[in-house]
Amino acid sequence: MDIETIRRLSLARHLYQLGKTSLASPNDMYLFAAVNLLQDAVEAFLIALGDHVKAEIDQNTKFDKYFLQINEKISPKELPFKNKLIRLNRIRVDSKHYGIQPARDECERVVVSVREFFEEASSSVLGVNFSTVSAIDLLDDGEMKDLLLEAKMARESDDLEACVIGCRKVLYVAVEHKYDVSKFKEATPQGIFAALSYAPYYARDPQYIQENVKDPTDYIVRDHSRIDQDLLKEGVDTTAFWNVWRLTPEVYRSEDKQWVIKHDFGKLDAATLADTAEYVFSTVVDMALAIHAVRRAVRSKQHGRYLVKLAREGVPVYEKADIDSKVTATTPVGMTQIDTDYRVEGLKGDGPFWHVSQMTNGTWLWGFVFNEDVA
């Protein structure tokens, strides 16, 4: 199966979910949106099938002709639910072009038929599960993709608990790990360690942790406003993110890379999972796709390694570009050069200062070196 087929199947599933959501609204005006979205979902799916079997379908092909062209290619098989889906198309035409409101009970029957059509045709023609076939293959190799593949396998084996836990791990890797305050539990880190945390400032404190962290998942202290801002930059639907966050159990990854799962019985109840797992999985896949698309589009500078020679041993590393600021570290005996990424004038007009960052013997040297200490 090629990438374009996967894209169209993902689109069909997305449109179907939107249509189903519209149908759930008590406002009858949403029935118009529901039937149009469901019909668009079916058409996207039929185009995917047509491309896959190389049926003669083009932009002028009528809706009912999709079935004829595809059936010719898959004979002796035939696409199921033809009459019901043609009826959906009729309802859609009446609603869109003549303003006739669809009947709610008929829409509710149609949405079931559409779902069954997707499942049966995906299995018989494409040899895949419609619920789990996804654009995961479009993702770059990496941990997010690996976790989604694990969740996909769990979904296919009906292990819905493992599926939603895997999806929550994706959220953790993509977003939540940045809000881990465990590194602050004994002392307040300085320099690069503090800069790497997105958690609110009040939570980066040993006393806060002592008073508020009751289990490992409490080490994640989220800044909701910042998360929303970052998600929007990455092209992720913030409502979808928080929906998944509410529907899935919290997870945490310890320093030794072991996963801790909060087995929330309400979220992992079998009846609940039957209603939520499919939504969670497809939504997380969509989020991962959005994140990867944005990250691919962003052009980053090339990272080289730049070194500055030191004039002597025991050079002080200042917290700021100011020789009167706190000395955060001193270069060890034997160090003759150090990594640097830029040079800048000092806060008091002196300098210049060299910004340095290097791990040496388990200690981070991070801050500024005065120009007089440079060879």
Image (tube, rainbow, N blue to C red):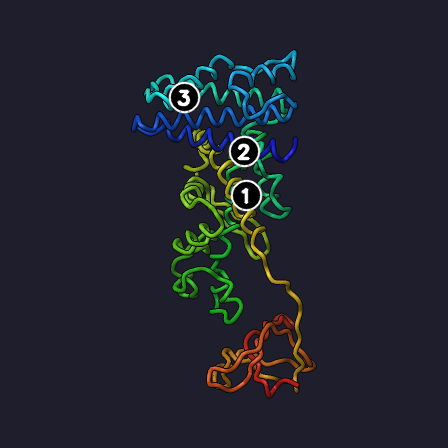
* In the depicted structure, whether residue 244 falls above or below residue 357: above
SS at badge 2: helix
Q: Position of residue 287 (x, y in %)?
A: 50, 43
The Cα atoms of the two marked residues, 1 and 3, are separated by 30 Å
Tag nearer the camera, 1 or 3: 3
Which comes sooner in the sequence, label 1 or label 3?
Answer: 3
Which comes sooner in the sequence, label 2 or label 1?
Answer: 2
SS at badge 3: helix
What residue is shown at x 41% (from left), y 37% (from top)?
266
What residue is shown at x 59% (from left), y 33% (from top)?
6
Q: Position of residue 359 (x, y in %)?
A: 62, 70
Residue hosting label 3: 92
Residue 365 in sight from this viewpoint: no
Mark 2, other Cα within 10 Å: few <14 / some 14–19 / many ≥20? many
The Cα atoms of the two marked residues, 2 and 1, are separated by 11 Å
Q: Amino acid at mark 1?
A: Leu
Residue hosting label 2: 10
What residue is shown at x 43% (from left), y 41% (from top)?
240
Q: Position of residue 269 (x, y in %)?
A: 44, 33
The Cα atoms of the two marked residues, 2 and 3, are separated by 22 Å
